Image (cartoon, rainbow, N blue to C red):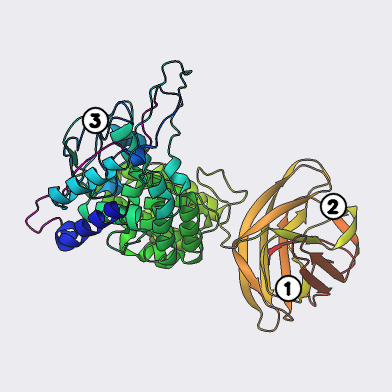
Amino acid sequence: MRCCVCLFQQSLQCSPSKMAAGESNSRSSCLNLSNSGPLGNAPPSNSAHSSPASNGGSMGAVGGINRSAGNSNPQSGPENGGGAETALRSTPSAQNPSRQSVGQSGATSGAASNMTATSSSSSSSASTASADASAAVPSLPSSPASVLVYREPVYNWQATKSTVKERFALAVGSAVFDAMFNGGMATTSTEIELPDVEPAAFLALLKFLYSDEVQIGPETVMTTLYTAKKYAVPALEAHCVEFLKKNLRADNAFMLLTQARLFDEPQLASLCLENIDKNTADALAAEGFTDIDLDTLVAVLERDTLGVREVRLFGAAVRWADAEAQRQQLQPTPENKRRVLGKALSLIRFPLMTIEEFAAGPAQSGILTDREVVSLFLHFTVNPKPHVEFIDRPRCCLRGKECSITRFSQVESRWGYSGTSDRIRFSVNRRIFVVGFGLYGSIHGPTDYQVNIQIIHTDSNTVLGQNDTGFSCDGTASTFRVMFKEPVEILPSVNYIACATLKGPDSHYGTKGMRKVTHEAPATGTKTCFTFCYAAGNNNGTSVEDGQIPEVIFYT
């Protein structure tokens, strides 16, 4: 084993610059190997006993990318001599491996075809190592009367070995290499090309397999991750993913998200999405955003937690569509932009824009149809609001669980409306974000209401958030959600006014109101305390004791 390591170290030291660069003249990098016997998971023996394959011959220059000429019996290595010389060559990829499907070039398929290698140790050193190893193998007595035992090889035993010592104990660190040279359908070719693996990434794989050295950087991490997955080396995969996590930023979040989805790394993908949620504007402005694929764009636009106004999302989608049209060799006309956006266009929540934002941007873009533009203008300007084909659910750029408090303990009937707003003053003991109110509905059965909701800063009389919308009720005494377009930040010990102006028939109302209402988070025990007070001025009769606005919906 010591000889194998020495040979491998010699091979790595001979010309590392050529290996990493693939030789500047675009030739494939080469690391010469000499084989002397079978390796790793040896084929099953028909003998009652079987000697370990790792004792059957020299492992060669890279610690085990070799095989015996016959490869049919683990005891035949010493008698058969050095075996055939095998050259494994790694050639630069014809296309970026990150653009390929992992399923198409996974570890299993790689085992039968797309292999390469290289060699740099001298033939004399390999021959000496082979002779020494052969001499050390005792011959086993024949036992014709013994019971024949067939043992199925264990697939990918290397994945359970995290250190080089453990991997050497079982001969080789990749199930793919093991299958290629020791499996029942082992290749007989003396030279195998790797057309889709970068030389620097393959060198990093070999160094990790046989020296536990992790050699990855910003320029090589993606190709190394691809190579580690192709040749079933999960320990190196984990190092690559950890490197990407540590270097995740808003300006590369979209690029890494695309790669995480391609390589089926759900944990990395989740971290990328969280970063995009927190830094949506910066992530959208990054250069790599327009390079993502359509599926990744759809996955992001489907999220309810993006922290940016909808008009900016639309602008970013148009930029992406322009780049995608060029990639598909289409003229960047409004019609072609709509075509390449596909499902992504329906995920832009146009109803969340203000009428001014919609009129200045989307309405004039040519991407929406005339019918869609008219429908959205009607949605902005008339009540009751007509149905639109776009999502009107607010995005909430907040994590955690939605919370709510109810300030009444009993519900009664008949609360009328004449254009005056229902208002109640409140304060909280800690910072929260209010996302909507729960309101009472009609006592006369299913009905639609028009409503304007607001939160006003009491001292400055500034409107911090509002939404002019509507809601449908079913005639029960339940509350019905009416949401703001964006979360409204509420600071501790500051007075605010919750305001709702309803237009519709008489409704239910709450009684036996509470001045203080406390919400306790089940998981953490954190308490959020609301204090309600009478709002001076016209308030349609709503007070601490009776009235509308029974429920506040918020995040902490």
Vertical relation: 509 (above or below) 528: above
**Tag 2 near tag 3, CB within 8 Å:** no
Q: Is residue 32 left or right of residue 253?
A: left
Q: Nearer the viewer, mark 2 or mark 3?
A: 3
In the rendered structure, find residue 187 and report the number of the disc placed on it.
Answer: 3
Residue at the image position 56 percent from the left and 57 percent from the top: 395
Label 1 or label 2, whichever comes before in sequence order:
1
Q: Position of residue 253 (x, y in %)?
A: 40, 61
Q: Is residue 520 left or right of residue 376?
A: right
Task: Measure the C-alpha gap from mark 1 to mark 2.
Answer: 21 Å
Q: Position of residue 375 (x, y in %)?
A: 48, 46
Vertical relation: 176 (above or below) 21: above
Q: Amino acid at mark 3?
A: Thr
In the rendered structure, find residue 497 and report the number of the disc placed on it.
Answer: 1
Residue interval drawn in magenta: 22-45
Whether residue 398 is in magenta: the answer is: no
Label 2 or label 3, whichever comes before in sequence order:
3
Count of numbered badges drawn on the protein: 3
Q: Position of residue 300 (x, y in %)?
A: 46, 52
Nearer to me, 422 or 58: 58
In the image as oriented, which residue stretches furthest toward the left? 25
